[in-house]
Image (spheres, rainbow, N blue to C red):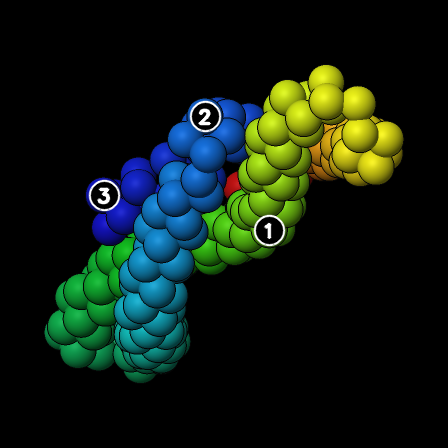
Amino acid sequence: MASLISKVQTLISANLHSLVDKALKANSVAVLDEYIRQAEDNLDDLQDALITVRGQVKTLERKWKIFQAEAEQLDSDIDRLLRAGKEDLAMAAQSKYNSKIDMANQYREQFETQKREADKLADARLKLEAKLTTIKQEREHLLALLELAKSKEIAAKTIRSLDDLQGIGDSDIARVGDAIRSRLDRADAEMETYSDRLDTRMDDVLNKAQLDDQLAERRRRLGLEE
């Protein structure tokens, strides 16, 4: 369980800027695809673990309440036996009460521990799902950006070929060259726009994460969280 939480925390804390930079350098979204694969695998493991732990929580809560109810009944019986002057029976009931209340306390402590574990797993699942959604969105944007860059490279090779031909003086070829240069300028502008949007989205995600951390710290300081 600790190993699973550790792997999930690593995925949650992954730096989006770094992932995108690696993808751009490799001219491929493979690094994002690998992140998505790992995140989805761990989400499945988280779900299985959460179901198991929540089942344990229900079992422990039921046993705690059973022993607690039996202890409370014995507590009343002890008082009744003492009033009736049945000291031996009262002593036996007291012994059973001690055993029952001890078991009730043990199950209560185990219930509280597993409840915290279940809450931790549920929280990790929500955070990983949110990070995975963001990564998938950025993968699509990055694919568009890489396709744009590929188009620009093709256009640039065409321009170089036209530069060689333009020296012949053919006015038609010159016009074609000018038209392609115009399209290349537009592709440059579109790529800059995509890059600006990508930076803005990544900054928004990182700023939100920082705000979440700050609010969480404030809640802990104010005693608003367990």
In the figure, is residue 91 to the left or right of 186?
left
Q: Which residue is mark 3?
A: 3
**Secondary structure found at label 3:** helix
Q: Position of residue 137 (x, y in %)?
A: 61, 51
Seen at 32% across and 58% down, the residue is: 41
Circle 2: residue type: Lys
Q: Which mark is residue 42?
A: none
Task: Estimate how packed mark 2 is, as few (under 14), some (14 to 19) or many (20 or more) residues with alpha carbons within 10 Å.
Answer: few
Q: Earlier in the sequence, mark 3 or mark 2?
A: 3
Residue 31 visible (yes or no): yes
**Secondary structure found at label 1:** helix
Q: Position of residue 76 (x, y in %)?
A: 38, 76
Looking at the image, residue 111 lies above or below residue 73 = above
The quadrant the C terminus occupies is top right
Quadrant hosting residue 165:
top right
Task: Estimate how packed mark 1 is, as few (under 14), some (14 to 19) or many (20 or more) residues with alpha carbons within 10 Å.
Answer: few
Q: Which residue is mark 2?
A: 25
Circle 1: residue type: Glu
Q: Which residue is mark 1?
A: 140
Viewer-nearest of discs 3 and 2: 2
Q: Nearer the viewer, residue 197 or 172?
A: 172
Quadrant hosting residue 208:
top right
Looking at the image, residue 7 lies above or below residue 14 = below
In the figure, is residue 217 to the left or right of 98?
right
In the figure, is residue 214 to the left or right of 112?
right
Circle 3: residue type: Ser
